[in-house]
Amino acid sequence: MPATAQQNVRVPVEQGGRTIQLSAQLFRPAQPTGPVPAVALFHGCGGPGQNTARMAGLLAFWGYAALVVDSFSARGLKDVCGRNWPTQAAAEARAGDIDAALAWLAQQPGIDARRLAYMGYSYGGGVALLRALSGNPDNRSPPVARAVVLVYPDCALADPLGQRLTVRQPTLLAMGALDDWTPVSQCRALLERVVRGQELVETKVYPGAHHSFDALGLPVRYLDGVGNRSKPGGCCGAHYGAHEPAWKQFVVDVRAFLDKALKL
């Protein structure tokens, strides 16, 4: 894979009457031929990791700019995977990071502000789902993003949004069939509540894969102390770890989805 240009940047986000500067890494294609589409990436409950950096590198190789946003460091957080899984209020507050990241990307030279997408993993996928289904905060303008990718997302975070949901942009859900942390069943139940835009949703379920199937090199293991919204009382325990066949197919699926949504 050719080297890509990386840059440490700050993304301002308003929260509680003050501005927080989120740390982020911007990846650009090595040899862009003009303004390029861009994807903002949002990590799971453990913070940015090798999976988000790996995906950003792939995106840049494919001709996209990629912004890996760290939602935790500026807030003094490191890992929120413990027994106290992130609250609904925390997830809704974090959704503002998506708006801020897209606004920041739209202002950068060499990026096509008309071709933006965002991608969320696990807890970050649940946050991305909240934003995708609720639209912009003012509910008056169409979503800025042209596409959304949800990677083993916490679909339970969308429970408070009601029984009649609208999907506004092409949305890809990528999930492991054996995921017992953010199970496929929760996302299927969510999709049954979509009354408009169902045709915009593409679902991929990878056989044999658990949560974090893209954590290459990490054998599947059981974490007995982590919060788990899919269990009674929200506690505890889940499997996670890599599944290389799922990862390889996921890469193919994401590239095809984004090329269709952003490059045509």
Image (tube, rainbow, N blue to C red):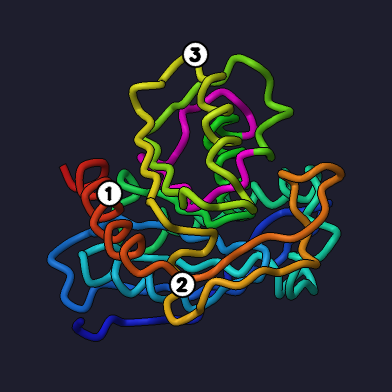
> Viewer-proximal residue, 17 or 23?
23
Residue 192 x, y percent position in the rendering: 53, 20
Q: Residue furthest bottom?
A: 3
**What range of the chain is rendered magenta?**
137-155
**Tag 1's secondary structure?**
helix
Task: Provide the major secondary structure of the magenta segment.
Answer: loop
Label 1 or label 3, whichever lies nearer to me, is 3
Figure quadrant of the C terminus: top left
Look at mark 2 in the image and give the residue it sits on: 51
> Viewer-proximal residue, 193 or 224?
224
> Viewer-proximal residue, 122 or 52?
122
> Viewer-proximal residue, 245 or 66?
245
Is residue 192 depicted above or below 159 in this figure?
above
Look at mark 3 in the image and give the residue it sits on: 195
At horizontal 38% and vertical 38% (from top left) the residue drawn is 203
- Between the C-alphas of marks 1 and 3, the distance is 24 Å
Kind of residue sitting beneath label 1: Leu
Earlier-in-chain disc, 3 versus 2: 2
- Between the C-alphas of marks 2 and 1, the distance is 18 Å
Is residue 23 depicted above or below 249 in this figure?
below
Q: Are marks 3 and 2 in contact (CB under 8 Å)?
A: no
- Residue 67 covered by magenta stretch: no
**Tag 2's secondary structure?**
helix
Q: Residue furthest left?
A: 33
Kind of residue sitting beneath label 3: Val
Kind of residue sitting beneath label 2: Asn
Residue 114 vs residue 47: left or right? left
Residue 200 vs residue 50: left or right? left
Residue 258 circle label:
1
